[in-house]
Amino acid sequence: MDQPVSSHHPRGVEKQRRSAGWGKRLAPYLLSLPASVWLVLLFIVPLGSLLIQSLETCSPVTGACVMTWSWGELPSQVSLYHQQFVTSLIFAAIATLVDLVISFPIAYWIAFYGGRRKNFFLIMLLVPFFVSFIIRTLVWQFILSENGVVLTFLRHAHLISSSFHVLGTNVAVIIGLAYNYLPFTALPLYVAIERIDHRVLDAAHDLYANRRAAFGRVILPLAVPGIFAAFLLTFIPAFGDYVNQEILGGTSNTMIGTVIQDSYLVNFNYPAGASLSVILLAVSLLGIWLYARLLGSRTIEEYL
Amino acid sequence: MSVTLPLDDAPPPAAPPAATRRRRKVGRFVLPTYSWLVIAYLVFPIAVMILFSFNRVVGGLQLVSFSWNGFTDQWYRQWSNVPGLTSAFWLSIRLALVSTFISTVLGTFLAIALVRYRSAKFRGRVAIEQVLFLNIAAPEIVMGASLLGLFVALNIGRGFLTLVLAHVMFSIAYVTVTVRARLAGFDRSLEEAAYDLGANPVTTFRLVTLPLIMPGVLAGALMAFALSIDDFVTSNFVSGANPPFPVWIYGVTRVGTPPQVFVFGTGIFMVGIGFALLSIVLSRRRSE
């Protein structure tokens, strides 16, 4: 408002332009510097030190660690804990599949028939996220326990025997994983299906495609990027998850996340924990790399 | 346009051809029934949580029991009676506010840099994009474990500072992605107009750019806040004697949960869902 008129003087403008030129060249670096430094120091450097730590050997007495380049630690940890890796893999895969099957129809329905209430239904899909992850899992412990709501009801209805139990079994862990990660599956699926042009579907019907053919040859192929994004956003976190297993599962079906947590926070065996983390990261990145090879890495970001 | 969800309402469908009639039947009966069942499944545990926050406790210890013992509002009247829980909750709120502020500022600047400057004028752009991607994709337990390893190696005591460092670290990428989506359709000529009127870059950013990208920045901030307040895995590794809310709850699950946990859970849920529904109402009003 009260900008002095003199700043419009040609020389003032000229000066401003020159400094703007410098600023322009430096601008991207200045803008990205704080975030980049933060990410390098607290994300990249720790990952590097994790790799280094996995090659160290620590004295069990003093806890002092020495770099011994013990590459053998990685395969030895794999052979020691391969059962937990396999368990995690199976649990995560089943939970992801269950989520895909549950959420495909609802994502399809919201995308094609949601109309003006689309946003409302999307919030209903996201509703678990408004309760803390830990409390959510804790509530499932309540629901699935022997004198909890569901089993008591089923027992009274004589649908299950009195010795039937869920809590502490593999089924309970998978139920918990599937519930906790369902929104991560449903949302990318919705985004992918929402993009499908309705006219393509009408064209399929005009060309005498029945419902099954239209679904299998039009909708499903066009939803593939969403299915892959859903797979990544559900499978990778479920693979490293240990909360569901600790709260809902028994002691026999330990997942790899539990082993890593215990190595760090219970046994203070950092090299073992670091080795397992490196392996977990490598397996996850392998999955992501395969994904990127198939579909390109940009598509993942589109679904976040 | 909504604040939290980057979605537009679809254009109203044209008059349906005969071929789509069967499709509509499925859309009208089978799918809605199924979808409401799924929504019921998603809501069910939350209903149980709210119900059990009103559950009477039998026996000496004030711990939640798996069975229903009768209605009471005792836990709402005594919501702050568990000192550890209350202080953990306020710690989580402080932590979320601080880390949201920092990560929103840093993430917004980074998003502007990534959208405005192509690789030729911005060396390292591709590397930053890859780091962001890796950050989002990496399993959380690996990030938590690696941070703990670093903090221990550098002899940094675990506490509020390490929590802030970690939470900003995992929030930046999400803020950047959210703000960038908003920036993609930005009209640069508005900024040029400001420059032509004699505004310097700072004034232009403050008076033109920021108000225009504000919905995206707010969405990013909401995301960062939600991520921070709900984070368990990373926090479990980097918190010290005073744990944040989720870590505290996890700690007591082995010994027994005080009913106040469900009171806090219900409160957080009500506030969150209230904001979400408000944003829908506002976006609908704006579009009308």
Image (cartoon, coloured by chain):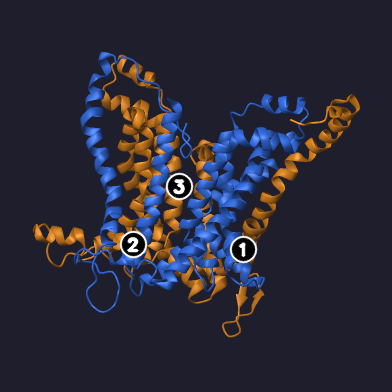
Chain colours: A orange, B blue
| Residue at 41 percent of width and 63 percent of height | A242
| Residue at 70 percent of width and 50 percent of height | A34
Could you tell me which secondary element the residue under label 1 belongs to?
helix
Query: Can you tell which of label 2 and label 3 is closer to the viewer?
Result: 2
Left or right of B171? Residue A175 is left
Give the residue at mark 1. Answer: A51
Which residue appears farthest toward the front when viewing the image? A2
Could you tell me which secondary element the residue under label 3 belongs to?
helix
Mark 1 and mark 3: Cα distance apart in space: 24 Å
Give the residue at mark 2. Answer: B262
Q: Are labels 1 and 3 assigned to the same chain?
A: yes
Please, what is the three-letter code of the amino acid marked with disc 3?
Answer: Leu
Of residue B164 and residue A242, the one placed in the foreground of this image is B164
Left or right of A62? Residue A239 is left
On the image, which quarter does residue B198 sit in? top right
Residue A246 visible: yes
List x then y, in percent, for residue B63: 30, 72
The answer to whether the residues at label 2 and label 3 have Cβ atoms under 8 Å apart is no
The answer to whether the residues at label 1 and label 3 have Cβ atoms under 8 Å apart is no
